[in-house]
């Protein structure tokens, strides 16, 4: 079998699986791995809010499981196994981590949340290589994670309860087992199916290749880039030839060094062979060309291409050109670019929107980002065009412009409101459900703009009355964002300036994407006003994209880019937000994530100010 050379590297080692999961045991056994099962006693009580991403939590849990087993076996036998494998599988939706349900009602809550929606399944894996020297345990940790997205069908209450009553959900992350009855709930899967079952075998094997099978120098030109390299690249020097000094894999596999300095540009004994050239910089070239793709997207939105195709697609290029009043040649090229960007599909009958484009790029719709696109095209593009000035002279050099007349100022405000409304609609439910806020009966969203988050709070918590407090020039335009007419009875809009006017009474105050716009002195001023208005036992909910060194750099990129041209304010870390709330009398500070980009911080007002 093709995996045998990979698994074979562990045949003469004592391998332990630190999990009682019968599914993981079955997956690894069928792959040919020989191992013992020693269930971990690690108490899975890590603070989920302390981790920047769900998969970071899964990885740390897997690592702690494996380390606990390694340590216990070393203490018992005075020698540890050669390799301990730990794994932890979690289900996440909207930034919330769903583990095993506590009871049937908990299973129902989980499955109802997943019903008809797409969610992610993460498995964190830790491979611990162990050795004992002078009675001390030495460990070398290799860790990784795998993500698979799963979509549930729309399921009836009867079907959900029938599945729950089968008993299957009770020992499964997320409350379902895809390999058994739970498979009937699933509409589609994108990624590694075995990862959803409980163990990402493909990724595990690739990791073993990295650790145990570094390519020989003489083979470097013929190594193929496949998921699992061909058999002839595995059979390198045997484990004994590599020596028994290490605690597991060869040092070349772990840290990339062989321990020998190269004799020349090609290293020793190359026999004239030229090593692989450096990898082709595809990602870099995509980055260099990225502004062109953005501008093509902006232009397609401005010309209402996605609106036309949502209403009447599929259409030929000539028909689209006529409807947007553009040339056939130019329209055809723009449509083809949108196909290449994954925004449109091209068929024999013409062009049509992808689901992504219809949902987010058409101008109408709850999840439309059309306003956000327009704001980036009309404002951010201009500011970033002068980024060099911002870097050389400071952000105000790029933002500076002649004073606008009132009509221009009004139009720009509306563009900004449309942009913020689209983003808020996209994340409102995730923010509203990041914590259980049912204990509050009144809330005030300070700087709540069009009320997108406030509406979601009112929808999620039937007892909650919500006030949106924003500038009069913002409040006057709110009705245009909610054309259905009458506002919900539990939602009201009050004009005012949160730096100057009395804040409306509320048990919970909300500052969503507000604090990063202000310098430290203004932030303290605002939080002092909130603290004075908030009664003991009340709460403050802060929503921001926090800086965190554990957060993936990619996730922090949007905030970092905006900071390049921001004329005031700054991004802050979660520790800084905790400290800010503490300084102004808020205790029991909790942190959660709302999707990939937002952090939600909740503090409770202490009985007395500090």
Image: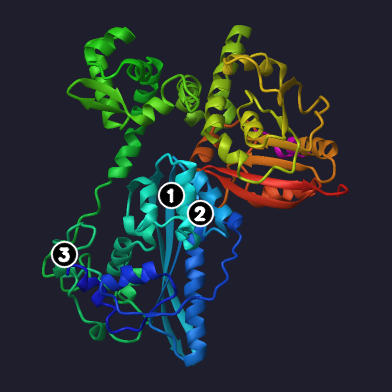
Residue 350 placement (x, y as % from top left) = 22, 20
Residue at image point 80% right, 28% down: 504
Residue 55 visible to an observer of this rendering? no
Main SS, magenta region, reads: helix
Quadrant of the snapshot with the N terminus: bottom left
Residue 50 visible to an observer of this rendering? yes
Residue at image point 38% right, 25% down: 358
Disc 2 versus disc 1: distance between alpha carbons? 10 Å
Mark 3 or mark 1: whose residue is earlier in sequence: 1
Residue 342 placement (x, y as % from top left) = 30, 32
Mark 2 or mark 1: whose residue is earlier in sequence: 2
Reading the image, the residue beneath label 3 is 230
Q: Is residue 541 above or below residue 294?
A: below
Element under disc 3: loop
From the viewer's perspective, is 66 left or right of 210? right
Q: Disc 3, disc 1: CB below 8 Å?
A: no
Reading the image, the residue beneath label 2 is 54
Q: Disc 2, disc 1: CB below 8 Å?
A: yes
Residue 523 lies in magenta, yes or no? Answer: yes
- The one of 93 and 56 positioned closer to us in this rendering: 93
Q: Residue furthest right?
A: 608
Q: Is residue 538 above or below residue 227?
A: above
- The one of 576 and 467 positioned closer to us in this rendering: 467
Magenta region, residue range = 517-524
Packing grade of label 2 (10 A; few <14, some 14-19, many >=20) is many
Packing grade of label 1 (10 A; few <14, some 14-19, many >=20) is many
Residue 507 placement (x, y as % from top left) = 79, 38
């Amino acid at each position: 079998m093709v995996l045998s050379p990979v698994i074979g590297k562990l045949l003469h080692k004592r391998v332990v699986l630190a999990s009682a999961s019968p599914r993981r045991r079955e997956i690894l056994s069928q792959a040919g791995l020989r191992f013992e099962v020693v269930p971990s006693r690690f108490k899975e009580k890590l603070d989920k809010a302390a981790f920047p991403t769900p998969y970071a939590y899964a990885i740390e849990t897997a690592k702690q499981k494996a380390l606990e087993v390694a340590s216990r076996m070393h203490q018992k036998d005075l020698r540890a196994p050669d390799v301990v494998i730990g794994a932890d599988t979690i289900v996440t939706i909207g930034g919330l981590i769903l583990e095993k349900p506590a009871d049937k009602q908990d299973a129902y809550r989980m499955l109802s949340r997943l019903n008809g929606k797409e969610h992610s399944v993460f498995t964190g894996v830790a491979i611990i290589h162990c050795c004992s020297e002078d009675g001390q345990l030495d460990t070398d940790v290799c860790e990784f994670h795998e993500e698979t997205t799963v979509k549930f069908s729309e399921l009836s209450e009867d079907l959900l309860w029938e599945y729950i009553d089968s008993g299957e959900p009770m020992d499964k992350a997320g409350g379902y087992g895809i390999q058994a009855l739970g498979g009937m709930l699933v509409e589609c899967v994108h990624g590694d199916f075995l990862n959803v079952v409980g163990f990402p075998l493909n990724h595990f094997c690739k990791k073993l290749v990295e650790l145990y099978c570094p390519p020989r120098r003489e083979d470097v030109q013929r190594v193929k880039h496949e998921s699992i390299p061909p058999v002839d690249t595995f059979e390198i020097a045997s484990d004994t030839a590599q020596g028994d000094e290490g605690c597991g894999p060869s040092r070349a596999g772990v840290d990339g060094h062989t321990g020998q300095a190269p004799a020349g540009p090609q290293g020793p004994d190359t026999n004239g062979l030229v090593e692989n050239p450096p990898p082709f910089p595809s990602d870099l070239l995509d980055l260099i060309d990225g502004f062109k793709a953005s501008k093509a997207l902006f232009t397609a939105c401005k010309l209402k291409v996605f609106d036309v195709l949502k209403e009447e697609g599929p259409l030929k290029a000539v028909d689209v050109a006529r409807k947007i009043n553009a040339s056939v040649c130019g329209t055809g090229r723009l449509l083809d670019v949108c196909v290449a960007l994954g925004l449109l599909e091209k068929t024999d009958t013409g062009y049509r929107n992808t689901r992504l484009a219809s949902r987010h790029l058409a101008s109408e719709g709850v999840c439309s980002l059309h306003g956000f696109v327009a704001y980036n095209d009309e404002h951010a593009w201009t500011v970033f065009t002068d980024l060099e000035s911002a870097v050389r002279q400071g952000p105000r050099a790029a933002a500076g412009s002649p004073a606008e007349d009132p009509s221009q100022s009004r139009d720009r405000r509306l563009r900004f409101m449309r942009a913020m409304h689209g983003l808020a609609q996209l994340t409102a439910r995730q923010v509203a459900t990041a914590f259980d806020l049912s204990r509050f009966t009144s809330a005030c969203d300070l700087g709540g703009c069009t009320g997108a988050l406030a509406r979601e709070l009112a929808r999620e918590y039937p007892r909650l009355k919500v006030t949106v407090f924003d500038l009069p020039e913002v409040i006057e335009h709110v009705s245009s964002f909610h054309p259905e007419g009458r506002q919900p009875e539990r939602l009201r809009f009050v004009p005012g300036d949160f730096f100057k006017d009395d804040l409306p009474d509320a048990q919970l105050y909300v500052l969503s994407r507000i604090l990063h716009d202000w310098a430290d002195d203004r932030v303290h001023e605002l939080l002092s006003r909130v603290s004075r208005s908030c009664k003991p036992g009340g709460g403050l909910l802060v929503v921001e994209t926090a800086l965190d060194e554990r957060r993936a750099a990619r996730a922090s990129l949007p905030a970092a880019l905006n900071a390049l041209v921001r004329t005031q304010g700054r991004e802050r870390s979660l520790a800084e937000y905790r400290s800010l709330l503490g300084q102004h009398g808020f205790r029991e500070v909790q942190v959660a994530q709302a999707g990939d980009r937002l952090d939600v911080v909740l503090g409770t007002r202490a009985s007395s100010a500090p």
